[in-house]
Image (cartoon, rainbow, N blue to C red):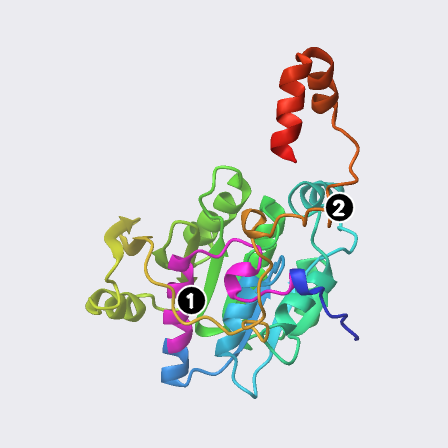
Amino acid sequence: MTVTTAPAAQRPRSLNDVKGWFPSLDQVLFDRFLTRQERLGQPGDLMEMGAYLGKSAIFTAAYLRSYERFTVCDLFDAEAPDEQNAAEARKSYSTLTRTAFEQNYLAFWNELPYVIQGPTSVVPDHVGADTCRFVHVDASHLYEHVAGDIDTARTALVPDGIVVLDDFRSEHTPGVAAAAWEAVFTRGLRPICLSTQKLYGTWGDPEPFQDELLADEEWRRGMHTSVQEIAGRRVLRFSGKPAHPAAPTSRYAHEPRDPAPEQRPAPAAPASAAGRRPTTVRRLAADVLPPVVTRAIRRRRG
């Protein structure tokens, strides 16, 4: 597929230039889990269901090994499978297009991920069971769709793989909360930790992950940590704004940015003002001021 180059004004110079919701706390947590998998040599591909304009996908791709596949599924500008989903897309993602996603992604990486343009219900047709080590679920906010996405993630993940559920506690996404906690209480999902925005869990054993996070005081600097208990099981909760981990570098990082409106030079004045017609204020002054005053003003201007 040919991807057109974005106009200079739209080229992302850094990850922060890519529109989306991916706060520094979750960048730190993504880095921690993905780096751990790399350190332990855990096999498996990466997957994201719901990409928007690519902010978290661009970040996640930094941890992709050469022999692995990164699958990204999103409707982008395709037709939604039902009216509820279509209404959600019109309200929250009206500016989302596949072209915009691909232009953002290619500003940081030379090759696109494996893109599935369509509803997440088709993911099992493209991603096999026990093939992924990390799955980020950030697609629909409707309960039925999220519940299906969680089932898809469970099937795709290898033992001790990580699933990340976005918007599990936002006030405008009760369907995500219902599906997330239903998975915890009835489908065997074990929460590892919670951030302000996301739930990190596994269908394996969460305790080795938790023990490492609690033992690393240097890593937790800048974050508030609390240990909760839900139904007799330990859950960590992190909050705060820690320093960002190293983000991927855009190929446009060194391009000059357009100056802010207040920094732009004022329009140049006409080369000569001698031939300008008198303004309304000047004509009015000539009509109402005494002649002696008008002549004095003209002599001074001359």
Q: Are marks 1 and 2 in contact (CB under 8 Å)?
A: no
Residue 8 position, x and y percent, is 68, 65
Q: Quadrant of residue 221?
A: bottom left
Question: The C terminus lies in which quarter of the figure?
Answer: top right
Q: Main secondary structure of the magenta part?
A: helix
Q: Amino acid at mark 1?
A: Phe
Magenta span contains residue 29: yes
Residue 10 shown left or right of residue 77 in the figure: left
Tell which circle, 1 or 2, labels the residue nearer the N-terminal end.
1
Residue 177 shown left or right of residue 73 in the figure: left
Residue visible at 44% across and 68% down?
A: 162
Which element is circle 1 on? helix
Residue 39 position, x and y percent, is 36, 83
In the rendered image, the vertical position of residue 118 relative to residue 46, given as above or below: above
Q: Nearer the viewer, residue 9 or 230?
A: 9
Residue visible at 59% across and 72% down?
A: 252
Residue 175 position, x and y percent, is 55, 42
Residue 237 position, x and y percent, is 30, 53
Q: Which residues are magenta?
A: 10-35
Question: The N terminus lies in which quarter of the figure?
Answer: bottom right
The residue identified by callout 2 is: 82
Foreground label between 1 and 2: 1
Magenta span contains residue 132: no
Q: Amino acid at mark 2?
A: Asp
